[in-house]
Image (cartoon, rainbow, N blue to C red):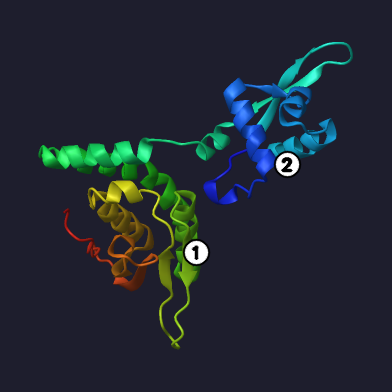
Amino acid sequence: MTVSRMDIPRLSGSQRAILDLAKAWGEATIPRLAEALALNVETVRGHLKGLVEAGLAERVGSRSEGPGRPEIVYRLTAAAERLFPRLEPELLQGLAEYLRRTRHQGLLNDFFEEWMAERREAATSRVAGLAGRARLEEVAAILSELGFMAVVDDEPGAGEEPRLRLCHCPLRSLVDATRIPCRAEVGLVGELLGRELQRETYIPAGDAACSYRLGPAAGGRVERDAPADA
C-alpha cells in the first residue's frame, strides 16, 4: 500500500508512542508494546490495527515470547519513515546553493531536464486524445501524484477559462536555492496542456499557491516566467 503525506491520518498519542517504540526496536509484538506503554493488550491491538490500515505498520511474521501461541511481529513501513526527522530538504537546498555558488548550476538544469524527460512520456500518453476540461483535470491528477496537490478552479465570469492551481510545492527547500525546478514545472505543464501559460500567483513570492491561467495554443512556446535565480 502506497501512502502519500496527505493520506497519513492524525495519530493519537498512543499510536505515536507505538511507532516510536517500533522504530527504536526495529520490530515489536503486541504484548511487548502493551508492557512498555502500560496499556492493555486489546488497546494496543486496536491501535496497531489502525496503523496497519493506514499503511504505517505491517505484519512480518510471528515468534514465541513465552508459553502460549506465537505473537504476531510488526514493523514500520516505508511510508512511516516520513513521520521521523529527515535531512533531505536541507541537504538538497545546500547542494543547490553550493552548485550555484561554484557556478555548476548547469548540472542542476541537466538533472531536472532528465528528471522531467523520464516522466514526460508516461504523462503525455495519459493526456493523449483528451481535450478541454478533461485534459486539464488529467494534468491536475498527474501533478497531484507528483506531490503538487493540483486543483482546477473555475473562473466566475462566463466564458472564462478555468485556472490550474498548485496548492503545494514538494520541492520548496530546493526552490529557495534555485528556480530551475519552477521552470521545469512550467515547461511540463505547458507541454501537457499544449497551451501557453500565464503564472498569476507564486508560492516563493509569498502566495498560497502557484496558479496558472491558460492562454491560446502554445505553438511551440510556453511562457516561463519564474523569477531568475537569486
Residue shown at the point (63%, 39%) measured from the top left: 16
Residue 50 is tagged as 2
Res 80 quadrant in image: top right
Task: Please state the horizontal and vertical placement of residue 71, each as a whole percent of the image.
Answer: 80, 19
Camera sees residue 160: yes
Residue shown at the point (43%, 87%) measured from the top left: 157
Task: Please state the horizontal and vertical placement of residue 133, each as a whole percent of the image.
Answer: 48, 70
Q: What's the distance in space between the residues labelled 1 and 2, CA to CA?
A: 32 Å
Residue 137 is tagged as 1
Residue shown at the point (50%, 57%) measured from the top left: 141
Task: Please state the horizontal and vertical placement of residue 69, each as a whole percent of the image.
Answer: 87, 16
The relative height of residue 118 versus residue 23 in the rendered view (above or below) is below
The relative height of residue 110 versus residue 151 in the rendered view (above or below) is above
Q: Which SS class for mark 2?
A: helix
Q: Which SS class for mark 1?
A: helix
Going by the image, does 80 lie left or right of 228? right
Name the kind of residue labelled 2 in the image.
Gly
Q: Quadrant of the N terminus?
A: top right
Name the kind of residue labelled 1 in the image.
Glu
- Earlier along the polypeptide chain: callout 1 or callout 2? 2
- Which of 6 and 86 lies nearest the eye of the viewer? 86
